[in-house]
Amino acid sequence: MSTTDNASNASNVYDRLQTLGISLPPLAVPVAAYVPFVRTGNQLYLSGHIAKKDGKPWVGQLGRDTDTATGKAAARAIAIDLMGTLHAAVGDLNKVRRIVKLMSLVNSTPDFTEQHLVTNGASELLAEVFGDRGAHARSAFGVAQIPLGACVEMDLVVEVDAD
């Protein structure tokens, strides 16, 4: 793809967000000893974001008190928060060349096996917003607990344009 094609495709990111009725949140202040993102070269690493509902941790455990559809909605909410952090990091989502990797931690019981379906909530939204540039590698893990009892946590690796 040429630079012109990439710029044309990228210019639709904010239009897609608007069509989906998504407003990007402001950069969240870390609650521990870390920074929200680190850039090295053209790679941007976003720290883990927990699921939030109404500004508070979206608490629950998949397979116990939270179902797959609810977990998927929580993952989608995290993707929106991640895009807010990404916007704060680069100033313009049109600078995103590629969503490289999404890692998902799903607070789940030992017998819950639908972590991949929960994670689809974020993966599908990233593809919808960024088009082909949103297709990414990913990992989805079931874990015994996530900080603050959140049901899902995700981090993201993104390739961005050079400054």
Image (tube, rainbow, N blue to C red):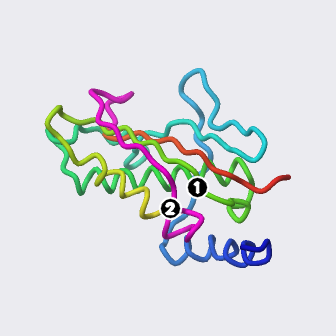
Residue sitting at the far top:
33
Tell me where residue 132 appears, x and y as whole percent: 56, 69
Residue 62 located left or right of residue 102: left
Distance Cα–Cα, label 1 vs label 2: 8 Å
Tell me where residue 22 appears, x and y as whole percent: 51, 66
For disc 1, the neighbor class at 10 Å (few under 14, some 14 to 19, many from 20) is many
Q: Residue at x 62, y 71 (%)?
A: 13
Disc 2 is placed on an element classified as helix
Q: Which numbered disc flags the more N-terminal residue, 1 or 2?
A: 1
- Image quadrant where residue 91 sits: bottom right
Q: Which residue is mark 1?
A: 99
**Amino acid carrying mark 2 in the image:** Leu
Tell me where residue 1 appears, x and y as whole percent: 71, 73
**Part of the protein shown in magenta:** 126-150
Residue 136 located left or right of residue 37: left
Q: Is residue 137 magenta?
A: yes
Residue 96 located left or right of residue 127: right
